[in-house]
Image (cartoon, grey):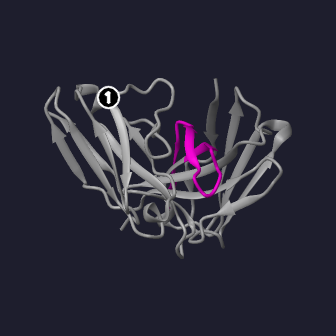
Amino acid sequence: QSVLTQPPSMSGAPGQRVTISCTGTSSNIGAGYAVNWYQQLPGTAPKLLIYANNNRPSGVPDRFSGSKSGTSASLAITGLQTDDEADYFCQCFDSSLTDSWVFGGGTRLTVL
Amino acid sequence: QLHLQESGPGLVKPPETLSLTCTVSGDSISSRDHYWGWVRQSPGRGLEWIGKIHYIGSTYYNPSLKSRVTISVDTSKSQYYLRLTSATAADTAVYYCARLVGCSGGSCRFADWGQGTLVTVSS
């Protein structure tokens, strides 16, 4: 069971907007540590999509955005495209007993 | 452009030691601003951070693996290494090397990843 909780799966039609949630605790997201998001296309390595809650690395379309509030964070994807079909992971530092960088369990996004 | 490449045996017999190498090209492994890390991914455990190292040799390990993990670096070869002792079937996973940036106040991000290498632990 992951320290950061994500819905296992979500789906949306092309052109729609989807929001993927990442729920943490007071020892990670709620403690103010930055949340990062990764996209993993089938058969490839994860790719950094959003960093420090709401920043996009160079080359990432502005259809992708991140937000954070309290002990949760969200990744929003607008104008859904078939190429967005992938697994999405949130990641943060956890200062509890684990004292390490932790990932969410991942959300598989299907574009219908 | 940065390129990270994992290499090492794809099959390890329990309880032998799992050893992997990450070769860094396109950027200096001796950068003060970056750390170099290992992450693994398996169906049962998802993505799991293993540890990280700075070129000066300082290391930081996942507490759940700390007793079995050693990460080291050879700046002359632009390589860093993972050793995981007493391997079991639970260590079967795809192992990624990654560059960590922005590591202030605990907020590291895994900015660049290798393609990953599957390691199976089985007799």
Q: Residue furthest bottom?
A: A97
Residue at label 1?
Answer: A63
Residue B118 makes an appearance in the image: yes
Q: Position of residue A24 (x, y in %)?
A: 38, 64
Q: Residue at x 50, y 45 (%)?
A: A52
Q: Position of residue A18 (x, y in %)?
A: 21, 40
Q: Residue at x 29, y 52 (%)?
A: A21
Host chain of mark 1? A
Residue B107 in magenta? Answer: yes
Q: Residue furthest right?
A: B76
Start-end of magenta stretch:
B96-123
Q: Position of residue B54 (x, y in %)?
A: 75, 50
Residue A48 makes an appearance in the image: no
Relative to B90, B20 lies left or right: right
In which quarter of the view is residue B82 placed?
Answer: bottom right
Q: Residue at x 67, y 46 (%)?
A: B36
Of B10 and B36, nearer the camera is B36
